Amino acid sequence: MRSKFIISIALLSFVIVVSFVAKLGYDRRHVYHLTIATAGKGGEYYAFGETLAQVITKHQPKIQIRVRETEGSLKNMILLHAKAVDFAIVQSDTPATLSARAVASLFPEMFHLIAAKEADIQRVRDLKGKRMAVMPAGSGSHRIFNQLIQHHGLTTEDFQHVQLRPENVLNAFDQGIIDAVFHIIGLGNHMTRDLLETGRVKLVPIDGVMGMRVSQPYFEATHIPQAAYSGYPPIPERNLPTASVRAMLLAHYQVDKSIVHEITRILYEHRNELVTANSQAATIRKPDPGEDLSLPLHPGAKAYYNKDKPGFLRKYADSMALMLSVIILIASGGWQFRLRLQQRQKNRADIHVREIVNLIDRARVIKNFEELQTVRGQLFDIFKKAIEDLDQDRISQESFQSLTFPWEMAISVIRHCEMLLMNSPGKMEVSKDLHRSMPQSMPVQQAPQPNSINKPHCNEKESDDSTRNNSHA
């Protein structure tokens, strides 16, 4: 039976080891194929997604990322929630889903309102009656544009909509199809630069952003710096007020923690390569509470961000040392108090024991029943006091038990002395009368009377004299 048990344990151990080795080998050879949702091919999201995929694959061949073209942020969030993609780039104002987790804050995106110079558009209000190019439905630009015009007292019925993809905007201006276009892009976008450098269009300021923050708190008031798109002639000619949101990298909560940790590490530790291929990577940072869609960090990203933080023991070492010192002091004080209480209980019990012993010594020399009954009463008074002390915790249970033996001995001595007095000549009648009046029951806690062997004798001299008189008679 024992040999079978040992064989079973050995086989189980072998299976566990083989499974562990196989899992380790699988993890080393396994390639993770992931998908990231971006936006149209002409937009910043798609360009950044391609750059990110290339740098990640270069430094971690086990992770292969496919860049998926989509309509924009809202669509990306829907795809991420459905687990159709593993990662997504969205604007920080996009309504979040429960399955999304924040990984990194990528770069700011500024509102660009570009208008043909001959269209005479000086502000957002002047868009009324114009032909307006709007980004695809589902994109962040499309949704925010509707909020922008509502804030400035316009509706979608006040101008003519022209649906265009970002890469077709330049041709639309050349052909006179549109008067203006609105999109949200990173500062310095090459397509926007090419469009502005034609000299046929201009940037229009967007005012009143602080007022928009009342209903849209994720908007940030900012400006497009002078000469951001061209130094000569400067485009724009001055700092141009506008608003911005941030592009966020999100992951589905079920994506492996180690994968997200590795991607986050590459984002930061190989940022130079990312910036070389895409300048927008220069502003990558940890998501701030006010701009991360109120989403929690993915555990993998959180583990990377907290790698330099001290551990719990190190962080709270001083506080824990202080608490430990206080606990030791309290425990020591409590222990000393307990010892003192036990000593006081023992001392009080010792007082009762001495009183009982004194009564025993007194009972041994008593020569009449009256004094003996007085001693008996005092003995019961001591027993009553001991019970009261026990109830009031002035003596412990152990100390009370220690009183039992001397108390029983005292009872035995008193009874022995009663017997001797009752057998004395000349006292038989009196003793009989007194015996009838004696208590016939013991206290509840009195033990059985011990044997009379080696008991102390009461009034031994008187007993010997009475014996000699009887023998002479």
Image (cartoon, grey):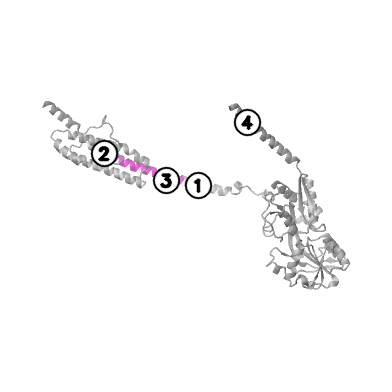
Res. 47 image quadrant: bottom right
What stretch of residues is rendered in magenta? 332-358
Q: Where, quadrant-wise, is the C terminus in this rendering? A: top left
Please tell me whether residue 343 belongs to the stretch shown in magenta: yes
Q: Looking at the image, which is closer to me, 145 or 84?
A: 84
Q: Earlier in the sequence, mark 1 or mark 4?
A: 4
Q: Are marks 1 and 2 in contact (CB under 8 Å)?
A: no
The residues bearing labels 1 and 2 have C-alpha atoms spaced at a distance of 46 Å
The residues bearing labels 4 and 2 have C-alpha atoms spaced at a distance of 74 Å
| Left or right for 466, reference 263 | left
Res. 417 image quadrant: top left
Q: Main secondary structure of the magenta part?
A: helix
Q: Which residue is mark 4?
A: 8
Q: Which residue is mark 2?
A: 358
Q: Which mark is residue 170?
A: none
| Left or right for 99, reference 470 | right
- Crowd around label 2: few <14 · some 14–19 · many ≥20 (10 Å): few
